Amino acid sequence: MAHEELPPINITPGAIRFNTDSMKLEYFRIGMEGGNSSSYAGIGTVAAGEWVQITTDTSDIQTGGTRGVFAVGSSGSYDTTTQYVTVSTTGNALDFGDLTGTARGYGASFSSRTRGVFAAGQNGGTNQNNIDFVTISSTGTATTFGNIHDHLVRYPTGLSNTTRGLLIGGYDGSAVRNELRYVTIASTGDTVDFGDSAGGTHYASSACASSTRGIFQRGSTIDIEFITISTLGNAAEFGNTLLTNQSGQFGLSNSVRGIFAGGYTPGGTNVNAISYISISTLGNALDFGDLTRTNAAYGASLASATRGVFAGGGKWPAGTNVIDYVQIMSTGNAIDFGDCIDSKVPLGAFGCSNGHGGLG
């Protein structure tokens, strides 16, 4: 008689087993969208997760050994340099390479499991429309991807799943924009129109995603919106932020939970609050905890299936080289991770990783 096999406790995402019933190899994934935790007599509640058969297409395996790459932005002056960390460890950032062309900050980024994309930004008030990409597992100088097809913007936000990256809103120098644009990450080329924001313009927003749904907070408002990444069309209302009218927040996720952190409120007061949402539902953000510092606006967000990392940020003209992290499926205050490279104090940094929630 078949029996239910209890999932291992504290299992590492990406662990492999041989199923003697099906005679197939399987891997374990946690934090999947729509997953439910289970209760077992004598054990308690086991985190949402499942064993998944490995096929010839293993592109959906998400492991914990994730690399995060971020562009420095402005470290006293605008910069082209990029740095990286291994999200599952702790320690200081290491040199990755450089972006192409003009030094810039306050751009947006998104990624697949292999490629990180860095788009838009500004240098001294001059907006940039170039898009670059890197191979996340390597190091070196970025390669040209394409350009923003409509408005040159700074302060946009980005999100992605495994195939499609979105660039949302931004400021074109005279007006805040409400356009949503997208690219196919595995290719190269200019952005294409996706739709518009549900509630209006987006400026200094933050974003996160599952493999199907993208979530973004409209900077300087309480509004959170969502889109279905694989479609085209306008965004819809999701809920409200924890604090009033935050801008410049960190945004990251695994495939179940989205995290917003830091930023500043009207009047320029920096905050260290962390909040969270359940991506597959609708509703308002809830309190998670606090960052280790208060100067935490316009930094780089990096994530794996289990951990969220917040690198740099600050308040103009001063940035910080602090990196801290949280366990995404818990709640509580952030923990020190390490530091950015000593000579680089990122402000207006933007980053991505090969293990975030949009990758399944």
Image (cartoon, rainbow, N blue to C red):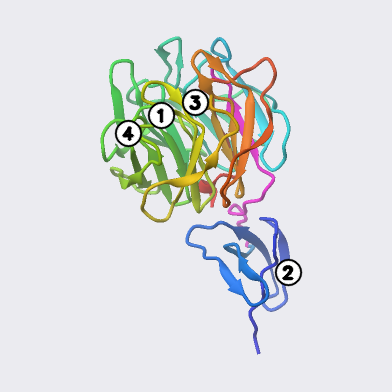
Residue with the mark numbered 4 = 221
Answer above or below: position of 345 versus 8. Answer: above
Residue with the mark numbered 1 = 247
* Placement of the N terminus among the 4 image quadrants: bottom right
Q: Secondary structure at mark 3?
A: loop
Q: For the residues carrying marks 3 and 4, which lies nearer the camera in this image?
A: 4
Alpha-carbon span between mark 1 and mark 2 = 48 Å
As drawn, is 187 to the left or to the right of 242? right
Q: Position of residue 143 (x, y in %)?
A: 57, 25
Tell me the tag on residue 336. none
Q: Secondary structure at mark 1?
A: loop
Residue with the mark numbered 2 = 18
Q: Hey, what amino acid is under mark 4?
A: Thr
What's drawn in magenta, residue-wise? Answer: 55-73
The residue that appears at 52% across and 65% down in the rendered structure is 36
The residue that appears at 57% across and 48% down in the rendered structure is 328
Q: Position of residue 271 (x, y in %)?
A: 48, 30
Res 353 → quadrant: top right
Q: In the rendered structure, are the residues bearing label 1 and label 2 in contact, judged by CB atoms less than 8 Å apart?
A: no
Residue 163 shows in this picture:
no
Q: In the rendered structure, are the residues bearing label 3 and label 1 in contact, judged by CB atoms less than 8 Å apart?
A: no
The residue that appears at 58% across and 17% down in the rendered structure is 80
